[in-house]
Image: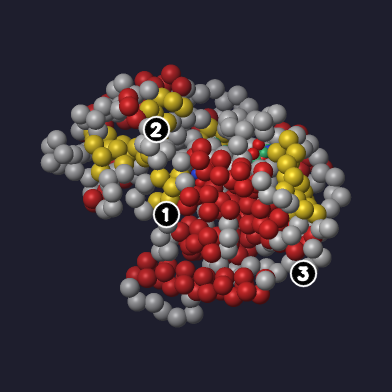
Amino acid sequence: MAKLTVIGAGLAGCEAAFQAAERGVEVTLIEMKPKRYTPAHHSPAFAELVCSNSLRSDSLANAVGLLKEEMRRSGSLILAAADATRVPAGSALAVDRVKFSDFITQKIRNHPRIHVEEREVTELSFDGVTVVATGPLTSDALAAYIRNDLGLGNLHFFDAAAPIVDAASINYDVAFFASRYGKGDADYVNCPMTKEEYDAFYTALITAEEAELKDFDKQSQADLKVFEGCMPVEVMARRGYDTLRYGPLKPVGLTDPRTGKEPYAVVQLRKENREGSMFNLVGFQTHLKFSEQKRVFSMIPGLENAEFLRFGVMHRNTYINSPGVLSAAYEVKARTGLFFAGQMTGVEGYVESAGSGFVAGVSAARRALGQEVIPFPDVTMLGAMGAYVSRGGVGEFVPMNANFGIVPPLDHRVKGGKSAKNEALSARALEALEAFLREED
Ligand SMILES: Cc1cc2nc3c(=O)[nH]c(=O)nc-3n(C[C@H](O)[C@H](O)[C@H](O)COP(=O)(O)OP(=O)(O)OC[C@H]3O[C@@H](n4cnc5c(N)ncnc54)[C@H](O)[C@@H]3O)c2cc1C
């Protein structure tokens, strides 16, 4: 009987374990929770979303929308869970994080070919095919083993999470439900600001006290390398007075029903669960001290008396130096049968992590079954991400979200602008994927 081991029951590990088991392989999935938790994980359930509850755009004109569609069509567990537990969020695919994790945990625990072990792995034994998917917060002992014993490098940057408030504590005399340009349902709560309110908030934000650096290598605060897509709101604000007004606080397409006008700035809150009893502050990932978060974010009109159910936090995000080390199937070139998956390979984001878990899981299953590992087509987003990680880009290797810049260009011109071109790239990808899946069978 073919066997493999997956380490880490996060987004990548659950997807990899499920895909391998569905292909007839006996899988041992080792997860350190609930015996040990990383600083950002809190629940004993698998595939925990540590910050936002959004899996981002669902449109085929968008690279992460294409990635999700590829995964959906390929039988991804993570996408099935997301579709089953989605909460209204305009054109984005957002989920109820508790139901999402529960769905995946049930499927994994009830799978006849997946056996779960609860313990921390501190080194690798190499007695069979293994997928390491321990994430950006891989426990210290295993991270040291990967860096020192395997010599796979150990790069890092910092990721921050946004706070969550109790919906009942929002002041709806000020805050209003609407979606930008009135598109779709009014899924967001909007907190409008006048220029005076924005000025006061902005000044408080850029001068607020940040949390202690603790285990951040005693690096100076200013030197922290942060991922652009998950940048703390106070860091973004320091880039300039208007940066937030062109970013997460942009007011365009929103009319305050009390004034009939577009506000000077708007803070948007997105539903955390289908019931709408909790909301997160969109784009408000932060590294401020908890007391400062309460003081400064309570200045946002409508949040004067907000009850913070969870404050934002910032964590080190570790990944290996994959270019030249991993193949496009996420297998260590120098050690056949050893695969890495998820954020630790240098892909960035929930869906990207699950997507790399998908490719690694399918490929590791083939390795365990004694079959040839077939590369995913590079015109698909699943294949292009693996190719990017195995090759790297220009200069220092930096984590990468799904994007159309990493797929080969079209061999013909498309009229209708960027979105028509992206849709053509998506159509090409889905066609190639269908052919690949037929070949795999
Ligand atoms: C603070 C923070 C905020 C983030 N916010 C977002 C966001 O808003 N949106 C987004 O798209 N992405 C975000 N990311 C990035 C990334 O998408 C997530 O971290 C994602 O969960 C990565 O998936 P993964 O499967 O690679 O790892 P994880 O989902 O973290 O799974 C790893 C699992 O391995 C387990 N584990 C760790 N070490 C061991 C060990 N030695 N032995 C056994 N088990 C172990 C962990 O307990 C965990 O369950 C964030 C990352 C961080 C750190």
Can the viewer see residue 208? Answer: no
Residue sitting at 43 percent across and 31 percent down? 163
Location of residue 184 in the rendering, given as x and y in whole percent from the top left corner: 28, 52
Q: Quadrant of the N terminus?
A: bottom right
Residue 379 placement, left or right of 284: right
The residue carrying mark 2 is 278
Label 3 sits on a secondary structure element that is: loop
Label 2 sits on a secondary structure element that is: strand
Going from N to C along the chain, the mark reached first, 3 or 1, is 1
Residue 220 placement, left or right of 250: right
Between label 3 and label 2, give the one nearer the viewer: 2
Amino acid type of the residue tagged 2 in the rendering: Met
Binning the other alpha carbons within 10 Å of mark 1 as few (below 14), some (14 to 19) or many (20 upward) gives: some
The residue carrying mark 1 is 57
Examine the rendered structure and indicate whether residue 228 appears above or below residue 336: above
Location of residue 214 in the rendering, given as x and y in whole percent from the top left corner: 60, 24
Between label 2 and label 1, give the one nearer the viewer: 2
Examine the rendered structure and indicate whether residue 302 appears above or below residue 409: above
